[in-house]
Amino acid sequence: MQDPAIQNILTDPTGDEAEAQEDEIVKELWEPEPWFGEENEKHLHYVNLGRNQFDGHVPESFKDFHSLSHLLLSNCSLVNISSTLHILQHCKNLTTLILTSNFPGEILPDDPSLHFKMLKVLVVANCRLTGSMPRWLSKSTNLELLDLSWNSLTGAIPDWTGGFDYLFYLDLSRNSFTGEIPKRLTTLRSLSSRDISADEPSLDFPIFQKTNEEGARSLQYKHFFRLPPTIQLSQNNLSGPIWENFGKLKKLHVANLNGNRLSGPIPSSLSEMTSLEVLDLSNNRISGSIPESLQNLTFLSKFSVANNSLSGRIPSGGQFQTFPDSSYEGNDFFLLQLDSMSSRYTRRKTTQYQRE
């Protein structure tokens, strides 16, 4: 008879006895020869071993977990990401792989022989990895969520990043990517026309925890499809324009391009991103004025163009009535303010920002 603990191994105990039991499960699972036997290997689907101090390699025995679909190994003091990926690619049904906060300072392998055919979710964040975007990722055509944030990856963001039919969440923030934003990103089907799938199983533990830009703990998610559709490219060295075709991403909720070297105007076509809730273009080299058409973004709750080279009038309609002055500082704007005493509009200039 199959042990019910095999199907869903958790590491979030609620008492001393449970904690001791689950510590033993974790210890045995990490042994070179698994404790549960060949028959139960066929039924192992969801494994969460996060926040355990393994301080070593992923065992070769993980190659035999052919039914494994969700594997969470975040904050485990793991080393040798190359070996880890070469072992785990043998898990042919693996759809979710989370390796956050491991492999400090290692090189993200670019071995073309790596292949994760069924992979939908890959999170390898906060590892200080070096290298570039690995080409083997382009073969994971079912990818829906990719998070490589808080690393030290360099080079250009490859054009094939925009070729995933199902990708709705992309976070490459806090790296050192250079070059232009791939124009092909503006054609992502899940952010323009395709509905996001909701066929995930309901799990008993959080499988994704997203932090904000300051690194503070944020929301936990048990379903990936509940994450807001996102393009997060902040804090890199990207240059070039903000493409007009971004307006085609009508299902995008969060667009964060903060802290790059983007230049040129803000396209008026961004007003066509009708689901947009967050638009952060701050700390770039953007010029011109804020298009009046952005007043049509009725769901916009956070907006910032601070520390650019913008000028002209700040729109006063729509959601723009709700944004703080800090959203505009460091530019050469003027505001039209209604003087209640004279019923006339007066001009108020924002602080001029001097870029080094």
Image (cartoon, rainbow, N blue to C red):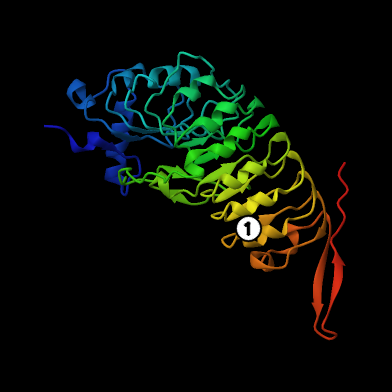
Of 144 and 105, the residue lying toward us: 144
Number of numbered callouts drawn: 1
**Disc 1 on helix, strand or loop?**
strand
Q: What residue appears at the point 79 percent right and 54 percent down from the top-left corner?
A: 289
In the rendered image, residue 133, in percent from the top left (x then y), is placed at: 58, 25
Of 184 and 9, the residue lying toward us: 184
183 with respect to 58 (left or right) = right
Of 325 and 84, the residue lying toward us: 325
Q: Is residue 80 visible?
A: no
110 with respect to 352 (left or right) = left
- Pointer 1 local density, CA inside 10 Å: few below 14, some 14–19, many at least 20: some
Q: Which residue is mark 1?
A: 302
In the rendered image, residue 44, in percent from the top left (x then y), is placed at: 26, 30
- Most extreme residue toward the left is 1
249 with respect to 260 (left or right) = left
In the picture, the quarter occupied by the C terminus is top right
Tell me which amino acid carries mark 1: Lys
Q: What residue appears at the point 58 percent right and 20 percent down from the top-left corner?
A: 107
Q: Is residue 247 visible?
A: yes
In the picture, the quarter occupied by the N terminus is top left
In the rendered image, residue 193, in percent from the top left (x then y), is placed at: 47, 45
Q: What residue appears at the point 29 percent right and 24 percent down from the top-left corner?
A: 65
With respect to residue 297, does 82 lie above or below? above
Quarter occupied by residue 36: top left
In the rendered image, residue 214, in percent from the top left (x then y), is placed at: 63, 48
